[in-house]
Image (cartoon, rainbow, N blue to C red):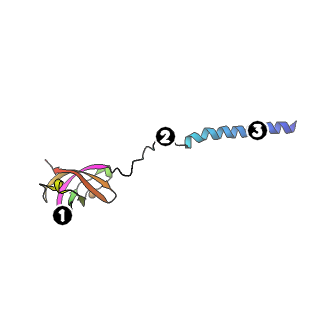
Amino acid sequence: MKYVLATILTTTLVQTAAAADLQDKPMDRMPMGQPMPMEQPASVAPTAKASGTIKAIDAGKGTVTLAHGPVPSLQWPPMTMGFAATPEQLKGLKVGDQVNFEFQSQGMTARIVSIRKAD
Ligand SMILES: [Cu+2]
């Protein structure tokens, strides 16, 4: 009789442990078929807006150097840096112009999406 009780007790303990295990597991699992909330395709660079002053233009290299203000969306402080730009985007712009611009930043490369003189 003692043996049977021990077996029942052991079985109950194992079942309780298994039930507890099942209850815990769903919390750890990622939902199936749902993308992670923070995930972004690596090929899509975020577009950010900023304003600044043109410090240099190199149409041959396709760059414009801008002293820009802070870019909160990228957590960038104000700085002077070069941006890739097309000749069309640089047309009509000169050193000293105040500009508003949009750009894409991917790693160390920042590329002008649009740029125009500030009003
Ligand atoms: Cu910068």
Could you tell which of marks 1 and 2 lies nearer the N-terminus? Answer: 2
Mark 1: amino acid? Gly
Find out if the beta carbon at label 3 lies less than 8 Å from the nearest ligand 1 atom: no
Q: Does the segment drawn in magenta span residue 64?
A: no
Rendered location of residue 101, percent (x, y): 21, 51
Residue 80 appears in the picture as rendered:
no
Image check: 90 left or right of 5?
Answer: left
Q: Which residues are magenta?
A: 42-56
Q: Which residue is mark 1?
A: 60
- Which quadrant does ligand 1 occupy? bottom left
In the picture, which quadrant includes the N terminus? top right
Rendered location of residue 9, percent (x, y): 78, 37
Mark 2: amino acid? Gly
Instruction: Please rate how many residues cluster around mark 3, counting C-alpha atoms within 10 Å: few if below 14, some from 14 to 19, many from 20.
Output: few
Give the residue displayed 69% in from the left and 40% down from the top.
17
Q: Which residue is mark 2?
A: 33
Q: Does the segment drawn in magenta span residue 43?
A: yes
Q: Nearer the viewer, mark 2 or mark 3?
A: 2
Give the residue displayed 77% in from the left and 40% down from the top.
10
| Labels 1 and 2 touching (C-beta < 8 A) | no
Q: Which mark is residue 11?
A: 3
Rendered location of residue 118, percent (x, y): 15, 49
